[in-house]
Image (cartoon, coloured by chain):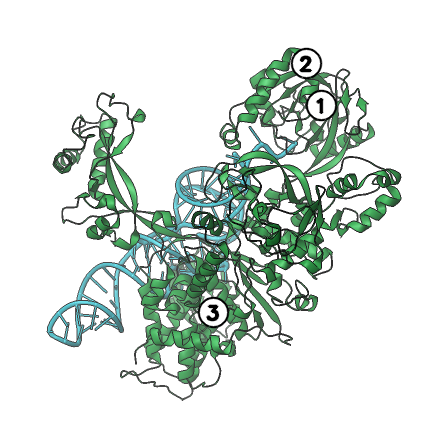
Chain colours: A green, B cyan
Amino acid sequence: MEYNFRDIEPKWRKIWADEKTFKAEENSAKPKYYVLDMFPYPSGAGLHVGHPLGYIASDIYARYKRLQGFNVLHPMGYDSFGLPAEQYAIQTGQHPAITTAENVERYRDQLDKIGFSFDWDREVRTSSPEYYKWTQWIFKQLFDCYYDNTTNKAERISKLIAEFEENGNAKVNACSDCETLFTASEWKAFNEKEQDTILQAYRLTFLADSWVNWCPALGTVLANDEIVNGVSERGGHPVEQKLMRQWSMRIKAYAERLLTGLDRLDWTESIKDIQRNWIGKSVGSSIQFKVDGQFELTTQGGNIENDIYIEVFTTRPDTIFGVSFMVLAPEHDLVDQITTPEFAAQIAEYKKSASLKSARDREADVKNITGQNTGAFAIHPFTGEKIQIWIGDYVLVSYGTGAVMSVPCGDQRDYDFAKHFGIEIKNIFENIDISEAAYTEKAGTIANSDFLNGLEVKAAMKKAIEAIEAKGIGTGKTNYRLRDAVFSRQRYWGEPFPVFYKDGLPHLVEDKFLPITLPEVDKYLPTEDGAPPLARAEKAAWNHFEGDHMEFNTMPGWAGSSWYFLRYMDPKNEHEFVNRKKADYWKQVDLYIGGSEHATGHLLYARFWTKFLYDQGYIGFDEPFQKMINQGMILGRSSFVYQMLVFGVYSGVPRDDHENMIPVELCPPILVSLNQKKIIDVYFKNVSENKFDNKNSKDFSEIKEKLDELLKELTTKANPENKYYGNYSLTTDFQSYPKHVDISIVDNDKLDIEAFKNSREEYKNAEFICEENGEYICGSEIEKMSKSKYNVQTPDELVEKFGADTLRMYEMFLGPLEQFKPWDTKGINGVHNFLRKLWRLFHDAEGNVSLSMEEPSKDALKIVHRTIKKLTDDLDRFSFNTGVSNFMICVNELTEQKCNNKAILNDLVILLSPYAPHISEELWEKLGHKKGTISYAHFPQFDESLLVEANHAYPISFNGKMRLKIELSMSLNPKEVEEAVLANVDAQKWLEGNAPKKVIVVPGKIVNIVM
RNA sequence: GGCGCCUUAGCCCAGUGGCAGAGGCAGGAGACUUAAAAUCUCCAAAGCGUGGGUUCAAAUCCCACAGGCGCUACCA
């Protein structure tokens, strides 16, 4: 019988499903192991070959751990709230729950075909009310907590209120936006709204007016990490700044712990670096600069102040004497107050132009130095000098205090600004030349700086901070770049908040009414007056309604995915989000596999929530994912056809200036094959570079000849009716333009012309300029796989053609898991052949099972034990690609030995089963293991004694160059080896009668003779 | 601009300081076959991106440069 994966694979998948083979045990005495894949969003497009890459790796590892006797938790579920389902709902009117369910089914179908060992009984979906009930519950706990910087953990709000009632907030050391100081009696005198506002400034999730990234096209706000290059990550729509009342999460409170916690994690340095940069810790100090003159400034409390101070944050307090001006962000609160009348108009103009610049323009404009003098002066706190105050958009209002003390000699941006506007540059560094650029190293000796003179940077910083604190104008301070995370989305398809409003104030819904389920709405669009879709819901549509109205926003995508790994431990619990005992058993995820693109989103937010839940004692660990591997993306290979375009839309346009003309497609389209296209490109390049006269160019005449021919063909093929055609010089006005073509109609770069013509209406009458042999050859490029690039390769067709085991092994065989690599099916036959070869080891020429029951031969034992060692090593360091190679070597060698020994094959099949589970189960059965599956067999133990050799062929190097080999007994000690080598006739030839200077003997490895 | 990763045969990749190569693809030769496919056997092919350094010994460790990729970016 031949290897027939079409029968074998469905057979075993059914057995696994029927017998719940991969169900994780409850109350097990076994050690646990938790293997998790990053939560997938079930998109309508289904899986492409890149998606299962990580799943295959984690599945291999999960199966390996089961064989090692671990109780393995290996679940799968869906992050099923999200934008695409909602966009689809808007377009079609179909409820997103329906499309989501369909997509999940399709996903599941595809996953099932690959033979994963998921415990499907634990599946969770973020969009199911049973799940989001607990997302809402966690939100409530966050609302009811604040971060205490003294105990360094989240504490209940009730504790804070008690403190307010006793002492006011003077002694409170919490992470807060609250700027007002109040006493106990003042607190008690505040009305409910005032108290509520103050508490919002402490809560870990809070309602506040904040500047948000508003995306009009999507009708929602976006988090910073959902914006890429100034446009929305999803859809690429423009984003603008807008002030909105939003729920936010006070992730800033955890900045320090999120940073230091990284050190304990077994993640790649690059991901940790990304998070470190994102958190952006800077240590320095705050310093207040008094503005020269008297003002009338009304403070928040309603008092009038005459002195205005500008607070800055700096990481270089040691350079305080190098300050020669200050710059405020254009949006800084004090700009209007301090601007002198003669500069008012210019300042107003600058502010206006700065506000009109989008984030994207500002980004593109980095090198353009702009700014405006306010006319005001600040007093240097130590020298008493008057220094100019400017505004400039290189200072960001959202970082630090929105103002900087400019030290042009030590900061390149300040330096450029000073040069541009002719402001003084003081040099406070000893023996450093700053005539060309600022000196930005944090090293050297400070000079021209009064009491800091002669000090090294580090000592100077310390002394400067002491002086600043002594003067009462500032204090040592740490700043984080990390911003609080906006938690509201103006969307329908997300978790509703457990919140209602009464008299404009938010209140939490009681636990007993949870979950607040998504109400039905007539349309999934905002209301006429711009409220989110939930505002459309009738009062009766809510399963619980309280107060004036319920919260209309929904939660963002990262809400459900921030704690899902906990729910898998206890997915059906109706009383708790997770039972503490179960969480104590399963603990952290031991191995987390997924893409690195979630570095600043999901991976940060999940850590934040985990730390919070730990602080509140709900779980016993404060990091969710102990070890993480980021699989590299599998890229697609796109195919291109080249369509001819003609420049210009009407005659009379000066044709030597292509930049101002629009290329227009010819009708019918003319498509040029790759090699012909290259000739044309060379030709036009020569035209544009005026290389026509270059008759010396070797292939020029050939190209010209071919081109003339081609252009003649172009003329005859072009539709004479084509209005864009006929008035142009063929030598200058044409250009080829690459267009993606579906890879399913391209075979080995050869285009199926008929299929192409039928693929789209506009190609029906297309004309082709082919290669000499009549074939149309496509160009190609390696790009991200995507529907729009027509380069998506689904796993389904490969499973159909080669089987899941081949697909699994081939995906691993492509290269190291972490590496980005192009998809290419060229090698898949080799992997498939390997499985067939393996199959033949078990069968005779007639296809009957034929096994030898004898004692295994020493050679065979050696082969299999070497494989055990290599495979164990490979798996322990997650080197899945080398594992596949090692199986190939093993099977090649056993084939060579014609080994059909049962004991040998038994071990081999167990080794292979994590990679190729279906064929392994089938062969396991043929080996006579009738009961149960191979999934719970024992992983074979490596026996070193089987690999010990009596002799070793020592490579003998002279000055590091290997010259000969001498076979010596392994029992010789280094001294004996040296003697034996020096006595050897061949070795003496190389010595040429000289005595060696030195002989290095590495026992069992090599001998190096230094002459 | 900053940070990180990569560069070994025509291609994908092993190589954990000690003989540059295990494997697969592609290529060549042969066997089987009427023939082809499939299968089997055999063969050829790189001196490790470049330049320094450390070492008895470097693809491997260190430094610089080049090329490719990814992330991040006026963060004071």
Q: Amino acid at mark 3?
A: Leu
Image height of B9 relative to A194, above or below: below
Quadrant of the rendered structure where residue A486 is? top right
Residue A200: x, y in percent?
73, 43
Asked whether the viewer can see residue A948, the reply is: no
Q: Position of residue A373 (x, y in %)?
A: 63, 17
Q: What quarter of the picture does the C terminus of chain A occupy?
A: bottom left
Residue occupied by mark 1: A321
Q: Nearer the viewer, residue A416 or A484?
A: A484
Considering only order in the chain, which callout, 1 or 2, is on the residue closer to the N terminus? 1
- Do marks 3 and 2 share a chain? yes
- Chain letter of mark 2 equals A
Mark 2 and mark 1: Cα distance apart in space = 26 Å
Report in which chain the residue with disc 1 lies: A
Q: Nearer the viewer, mark 3 or mark 2?
A: 2
SS of the residue under disc 2: loop
> Which of the labelled discs sits on residue A340, or is there none?
2
* In this picture, residue A871 sits left or right of residue A550: left
- Residue at the spot of label 3: A871
Residues under labels 3 and 1: Cα distance? 63 Å
The quadrant in which the N terminus of chain A is found is bottom left
Query: Which is more N-terminal, label 2 or label 3?
Result: 2
Q: Chain of mark 3?
A: A
Which comes sooner in the sequence, label 3 or label 1? 1
